[in-house]
Image (tube, grey):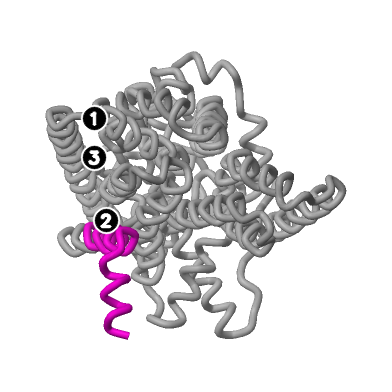
Amino acid sequence: MISRLKTIASREWFLLFAGALAVRVIVVAATGFDGLYGQDAYAYFDQAMALRTGILHGILAPNDFFWPQGYPLMAAMVSLIIGSGPLAAQLVSLVAGAAAAPLTFLIAQRLLPRENRSASILAGLFVAVGAQAVISSIVIMSDAAALALLLAAMWIVLKFHKHPRNLGHLGLAVLFGAAAAATRWASLLVGPALALPALQGLDTGGGRSRRFVFLVGGGTFALMGTILVATLKLDAISGYFERWSLINLLHGPIAEIPSQALSAKVPGLIFYLAPIYHPAFLGPLLGGLALLGLWKAGSASSRLSVTLLIVWIAVPTIFCAGLPLRNLRFCLLTLVPWSIAAAWGASALATTLLRRRIIVLLVGFSCMANAGWGVHRIDRLTSNQENLIKTVRAVEELIPPDGIVLTFEITQLMQHHSRVETLELFDQTPASMERLLADHRPLFVLIQPLDIEERWQDLPPGQNIRELQRHGRLVETGHFGPYTLSRFKPLSSAPERP
């Protein structure tokens, strides 16, 4: 038993997992960050706790959650073991984010020439210490969990490609792929890359007839479709397709993004190639190696390996670039293929002792520079969260106990860190606004006025603010960074509670 443990501990995949987990745990311990940041993290956490309550009491959890249920369900299951609280959800992200590194190594071993094991290790290292990969591993969101499930599906389907008689591998790959999509629907964008080795394995698996291939393939995708329909809100997915536009790939700015943000000014295609130039991922030096690696892989690896990497990169990049959204964490979908390409580019150049030394220095410098950016970003993230919590507590002191506050983009923090009755401005309808106006309790609004004016004038936040202004005035009572707290003063002479 002891000898077996020593063997496992000496393996590259185990060392990559242990190292990646250590990096993430150190970050959490050093910052005291509990994983709750922004609206999305609180929404995931609330849903996880609702599922936990449903499991414990045998009742149905709320089904109005916008995103897939996979991540909240995993967090709920962990919370049954370690108790309720943010740690359960954060632990899912920590372990999943750390698992992405060894899975990258295992996938690289299948795609790259087997004689170069160091390139596979390097690919895993890039994912282990990448700034955005680390950030997504400490936040209570679905990105890290979905990435780990997706990589497990890719590794297993590549095993099936090599041993196509083992249909169990294909079934397992489908289950992991479906679980990834049921955790984060954007995982479906890697579906074409997953299908390449699966279909080739089915077609060459011991002389199977095409009819048999069709039946197995059709049954596999039917199973995956059934799982997805049962767990995803299809209207949420269709909404993204409706907003997709070729113009967004090639042109900026994007109206939905604050104009002062650099991401609003660049074409989507440039933004979503961030893994090869942004320090959150590989950075420009390693990105150059990635481009070289893709070119070199064409002559050194199998056609399947090169095609798979290109499809894995191209489909998510083009789709995300066509959306009126810009978010670096979306680039996690293509981090692994770019990392594998960068590792192979470094290996292809390191043909002499001098070149190897130069590559080692280049890789080391890039990793340190990227880590420096990551430290800065994490410090800003945690500082912003602390400042927002201070804002919430300061606002709470200015609102009477029977008051109501309408908020936007800070709603979840108000609900978690104050006792004030808080309503989301975006969710209000004409009927609910009419009820609020008829209620004589003190009514407050906490928003970023410039952001509402610039981005949300023609959407519910702007419409609802104008509705208030038609029936009264908003009197400013306090400023907290970009946020302004205002009290609604009705035009009518109806008595209002003090």
Q: In this view, does 270 lie above or below 61?
A: above
Name the residue at 31% across, 30% down: 348
Which residue is disc 1 drawn over?
351
Q: In this view, does 433 lie above or below 269?
A: below
Which residue is disc 3 drawn over?
481
Which residue is disc 2 drawn over?
389
Q: In which quarter of the image is residue 463?
A: top right
Q: In which quarter of the image is residue 477?
A: top left
Name the residue type under label 3. Answer: Gly
Dot 1: few (<14), some (14–19), or many (≥20) neighbours within 10 Å? few
Q: Main secondary structure of the magenta part?
A: helix
Q: What percent of the width, then of the height, locates residue 138?
A: 32, 57
How far apart in space, not on screen, are marks 3 and 1 (Cα)? Answer: 54 Å
Quarter that holds the C terminus:
bottom left
- Is residue 382 rendered to the left or right of residue 305? left
Label 2, secondary structure: give it: helix
Over which residues does the magenta segment extend? Answer: 1-24
Label 1, secondary structure: give it: loop
Question: Is residue 82 or residue 13 the one in the foreground?
Answer: 13
